[in-house]
Every structure is written in C-alpha cells, then in structure tokens.
C-alpha cells in the first residue's frame, strides 16, 4: 500500500507558502509506516520544532489501474475520508532551499493519520464537499473540494501515468489555506460535511 499526496492543490494555500500555482499536479509519497488509524494519537517527532497540520480529503483506490483515463477515473475509487498530512515545515524548508527531496519532512512515523472512510455514494456531489479542522476547539482550516485546482479524476489520471495504482492505495488530495503548527497537548478534530470523522490528541 502506498500513500500518494498532492501538493499545492488549493490556490490560497500555494500562496500562503509563497509557492507557484502549478500547471500540473505535484505529488510525493509517504510510506505505509506513516499511517495512523482509529484516532490514535499523533506523536510529535523529536527532530522537528515546527510540525504543521494539513487537513486533506483522502480517497481510497479500489482496483488496480495504470494509465487511467480521466473520464474513467471515477471507477477507481468508491470511498472518501479525511487525513492530516503532518509536515515538519522546518525540515521541508531546508530541503526545498537545497533542492532536495522532502521525505524526512513528510514521510516520518505518524505523519499520516486518516479517518474511517465513507462511501462516495453517500454524497450528492463529491466535487462540492466542505471540510474543516478544529484545533483545540477553534476552526483552523476550512476547505471545499470545489476549490481544488486538480479534481480527484485528474489526479488519478495524472499519477497513474507514472505509477500503477493498487487496491488500498490512499491519495491525499491537498490542503486548503490555514496550515499551522501543532504542539504536544493539542486536540485535533476534523469534519467532512459537518460530520466528525477524526478526533485525536498530539502527544
Ligand atoms: Mg499536504
């Protein structure tokens, strides 16, 4: 199982980090060892002093596919949920400056908590889903999938040109604006269309 993460998929977030708005999807991978399920705690790593939350809508791939055409891409996922793409922003900035890969900033243990998944059929339009991160009782991030630069289908088509997608692969589809630091003792709650899907502590 692999975890594919899309970067810079919301204009306001690309701008808050002074990044260019991309003309094609930017993606990177996290290892399966980054995964956290069932609202287990996020353990703050000792190698960073600036870990940020990035709340994202996550889709789960339900069949094997390679070179998938965008018009067929909706057949390759049937479940949707939320995840937090935890990012060691201090390490990421250092790697970006040096033009080096981001893995140590993005792929560390516990860096990919995900919620349970809901059937796509439960929503009238997955291209218009609101989602929200509440940090210690206050809304920290709010997004809507209608604001994605690259749709779920476009992402699947793009990524599957380069790597085969397999059943169980997860795709984090990018974070909206409002990313910021977390600290030990924080509580994170995440909502999709008003329904609470995640509630976990930082330890
Ligand atoms: Mg992200």
Image (spheres, rainbow, N blue to C red):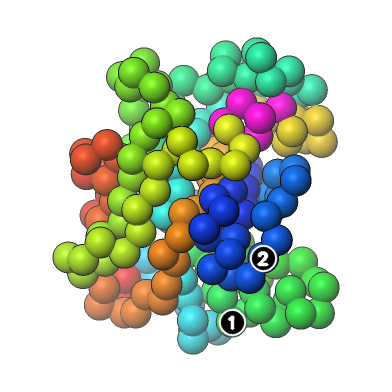
Left or right of 16, for residue 178: left
Name the residue carrying label 2: 19
Q: Position of residue 187 (x, y in %)?
A: 24, 67
Residue drawn at (82%, 36%), measured in percent from left and top?
Answer: 162
Extent of the magenta region: 152-157
In this rendering, the count of numbered labels is 2
- Disc 1: residue Cβ within 8 A of ligand 1's nearest atom: no
Residue drawn at (40%, 31%), measured in percent from left and top?
Answer: 128
On-image quarter of the C terminus: bottom left
Q: Residues within 10 Å of mark 2 (few under 14, many from 20)?
A: few
Name the residue carrying label 1: 90
Left or right of 105, for residue 120: left
Q: Secondary structure at mark 1?
A: helix
Q: Secondary structure at mark 2?
A: loop
* Above or below, comparing residue 161 to residue 105 in the picture: above
On-image quarter of the N terminus: top right
């Amino acid at each position: 199982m692999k975890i594919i993460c899309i970067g810079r998929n919301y204009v306001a977030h690309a701008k808050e980090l002074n990044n260019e708005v991309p003309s094609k999807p930017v993606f990177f991978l996290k290892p399966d060892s980054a995964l956290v399920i069932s609202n287990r705690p996020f353990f703050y790593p000792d190698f960073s002093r600036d870990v940020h939350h990035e709340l994202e809508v996550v889709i789960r791939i339900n069949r094997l596919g390679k070179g998938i055409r965008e018009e067929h891409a909706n057949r390759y996922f049937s479940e949707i949920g939320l995840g937090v793409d935890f990012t060691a922003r201090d390490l990421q900035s250092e790697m970006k400056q040096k033009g080096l890969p981001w893995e140590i900033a993005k792929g560390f243990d516990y860096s990919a908590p995900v919620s349970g998944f809901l059937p796509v059929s439960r929503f009238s339009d997955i291209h218009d889903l609101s989602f929200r991160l509440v940090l210690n009782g206050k809304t920290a991030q709010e997004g809507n999938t209608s604001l994605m630069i690259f749709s779920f289908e476009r992402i699947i088509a793009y990524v599957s040109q380069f790597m085969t997608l397999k059943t169980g692969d997860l795709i984090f589809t990018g974070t909206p604006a409002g990313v910021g630091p977390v600290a030990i003792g924080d509580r994170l709650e995440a909502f999709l269309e008003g329904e609470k899907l995640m509630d976990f502590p930082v330890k």
